[in-house]
Structure formats: C-alpha cells, structure tokens
Amino acid sequence: MTADRKDLSLIAERLRLGVGFSASELDWVAERLAALGSRLRSFHEGQVDLEISVKDRNGAGQQLTLECRLHRFPGLHLVAGSSAPDLPVALNEVRGDMIRQVDHAKTRTEPRHNRALRHAPTTASGA
C-alpha cells in the first residue's frame, strides 16, 4: 500500500459526513482530503475525529466546515471553513487550512529536534 493509499484510508476511517453530504460521497470527499492524512498519521486510532458539513450547498451562501478534534492534546478542537461557491475548491481550501492548523498544533505541543534541549546539562553529585 502506498503512502497515498494509507492517507486516503486513514481519512476515510476517521471522517464523519455531516449536514449537506450523503454517505455515498464519503470516498469522493476522503480523496479530496487525503493530503491531510500524512499530518494525522502520528496520532493513534481514536485520537482523531474529523467531521465535515456544508450549509446551503450549491447556494449563494454555501459554507463548508471541517472540524478536527485531537484527543492527544486535551480539548484541542480545530475548525477550518470556506465560503467558496465551488465545492471542490472549498474542500481544497479547508484541507489546506486544516493542514496548517494541525502542523501548528503539533509544533506547539511536541519538543523540537533540538539537541541542546534533549540533553540538558546535569549537575554533578557529590564533592
């Protein structure tokens, strides 16, 4: 299985379709959001919940919302939205925004690969 297939299956497993989507659209929506999968691979099953919904689909005020709950970080609820009138464009916009938010959340809470921080100086015991 390639990385792209793994990302697609990860998104399909964790994505819940909300208002405005039918169950038959799961594969199509998951394909559009698959690039987000590589960012979510570091989370164990059960640590990520995704939900996507659209209000006023194909209308003048269409609003697409992608929500991501990361349970590894207590209370972290990320939301990306788009009001683009074209649904595929809106999906691309929320995917890009969510990738940015997940990356930011991970860098805020996980230590950087900084050797100086990993190997803090220890004090000598005894005299």
Image (spheres, rainbow, N blue to C red):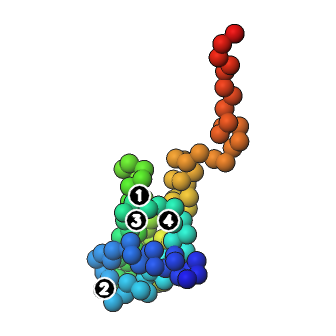
Q: Which amino acid, by three-letter code, is at mark 1? A: Leu
> Where 115 falls versus 75 (above or below)?
above
Amino acid type indicated by mark 4: Leu
Q: Residue at x 68, y 19 (%)?
A: 124
Cα distance between the residues tagged 4 and 2 = 22 Å
Q: Earlier in the sequence, mark 4 or mark 2?
A: 2
Q: Mark 4 against mark 2, which lies toward the viewer? A: 4
Which is in the foreground here, disc 3 or disc 2?
3
Measured Cα–Cα span from mark 3 to mark 2: 21 Å
Label 3 sits on a secondary structure element that is loop
Q: Residue at x 44, y 62 (%)?
A: 44
The image shows residue 91 at horizontal and vertical percentages of: 47, 77
At label 2, the amino acid type is: Ala
Between the residue at mark 3 and the residue at mark 1, the CA separation in whole angstroms equals 11 Å
The foreground one among 68 and 11 is: 11
Q: Which residue is mark 1?
A: 70
Report whether 19 appears left or right of 89.
left
Q: Say which residue appears at 46% left-offset and 79% top-offset.
A: 9
Closer to the observer: label 3 or label 1? 3
> Mark 3 or mark 4, which is nearer the start of the sequence?
4
Which amino acid, by three-letter code, is at mark 3? Answer: Glu
Query: Tag 2's secondary structure?
Result: helix
Question: Which residue is identified by label 4?
Answer: 40
Q: CA distance from mark 1 to mark 2?
A: 23 Å
Image disc number at residue 30: none
Residue bearing the label numbered 2: 23
What residue did someone put label 3 on?
A: 45
Q: Mark 3 or mark 2: which comes first in sequence?
A: 2
